[in-house]
Amino acid sequence: MNESKIQTLDQVRQFLDGTRDVHFAIASDDQSRYAHISDVVRRFGYRRLGRPDKGLVLRYLQRTSGYSEPQVKRLVKRVRAGQGLRKRYQAPAHPFARRYTHADVLLLAELDRAFGTMSGPATAHLLQRAFSHYGDGRYERLSQLSVSHLYNLRASPLYQRRRVLHTKTRPTNNSIAIRRAPAPEGRAGFIRIDSVHQGDLDGVKGVYYINAVDCVTQWQVVACCEQISEAFLLPVIEQMLQSFPFTVLGFHADNGSEYINHRVAQLLDKLRAEFTKSRPRHSNDNGLAETKNAAVVRRVFGYAHIPQRFAALINTFCTQHLTPFINLHRPCLFATEIADARKPGRVRKVYRHADVMTPLDKLASLPQALQNLRPTVQLPTLQAQARSISDLHAALRVNEARQALFKTIQRRRA
């Protein structure tokens, strides 16, 4: 645009009024715009103008240069002071080196996709294990990644491009089981159990998942059954209790009648296991199992309706793939209790990176781990099984088995 013939303020006013609805394509060359601003300031004698006329010239420069009002004022001030307009910013001669490359971000995205985007400390622990335990050199830099910067990488554009009804339990009065929270006292074998429903479709019930978690080691066993009646549920519970590598010493459930009944009580009595149930207004009594419902069961199976006739197929997947993976390769966060200096008598829980480990590692760290193991279970055998495949490959294998499972369900439903 050649505007050198605009010499008077009236012409400027007419220009602004006549181009109110006109949008200019401003040149990206800053030096040309700087020269234009310097020429206009000298042409109209900006220093001698009154306040209204200065505002008119500033609006004119704002319209023709494309700069914001504060930027135009700063540049005009520099021209009036006799300073030449030039771009002050220059790229640093020695920019900071990028520590984590695009390949590292893609590796992180791949691991998050396999594990379902776990928490920061758990993911950082997986990255360390991939390099230190399994010797995968691709994770050498990522093994030193801090939890805070991990979230920065997840927010990066490259990572983002790569990763492109509730029914309350009805209370019933039942004298079965002891109404208190489990007290494991650092021993493995105290189980918390809960049910997860896969949803209804036109009034037809879906499958039910049974989720059992050990209080101390977070060793988790997931099973599936058609219904939660005694005929279907009891064999599944008996199978799950035998799946734990240690002797079951305690069994805790909420107040649902599927667990608080005489048949379950007789089964636990044969095992000499303590039977407890949740207390009113103490939602955390069974909180561990409920958190695993969302973090594991819902993340793997979702919320869509699955017909009950596929319960046996899903149960096979849980037994062969899901349960070994979450206990041998999926890290969990364990709390460390410290005394609160500000409130004597209070205990505060903190989650340190050193406390992140798999359920198998937690079991091996217990002082009485070998005493409570079943006779048919050997701890070195479990550890060798965990080291036979990396965490990432185990996650990918579970995902492949899950996809095959859902393809089979879709094919048989059609």
Image (spheres, rainbow, N blue to C red):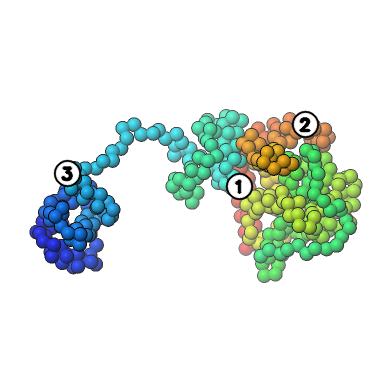
Circle 3 crowding by C-alpha within 10 Å: few under 14, some 14–19, many from 20: few
Q: Residue at x 50, y 40 (%)?
A: 149
Disc 2: which residue: 367
**Spatial distance from mark 2 to mark 3, Cα to Cα?**
79 Å
Q: Say what amino acid the circle numbered 2 marks.
A: Pro
- Residue 271, quarter of the rendered image: top right
**Spatial distance from mark 1 to mark 3, Cα to Cα?**
68 Å
- Residue 377, quarter of the rendered image: top right
24 to the left or right of 298: left
Disc 1: which residue: 399
180 to the left or right of 343: right
| Mark closest to the chain's N terminus, 1 or 3 | 3
Label 1, secondary structure: give it: helix
> At which x and y percent is residue 13?
17, 65
> At which x and y percent is residue 396?
59, 43
* Quarter of the image where the C terminus is located: bottom right
Circle 1 crowding by C-alpha within 10 Å: few under 14, some 14–19, many from 20: some
Residue sitting nearer the eye, 332 or 147? 147
| Mark closest to the chain's N terminus, 2 or 3 | 3
Residue sitting nearer the eye, 184 or 56? 56
Q: Say what amino acid the circle numbered 3 marks.
A: Gly
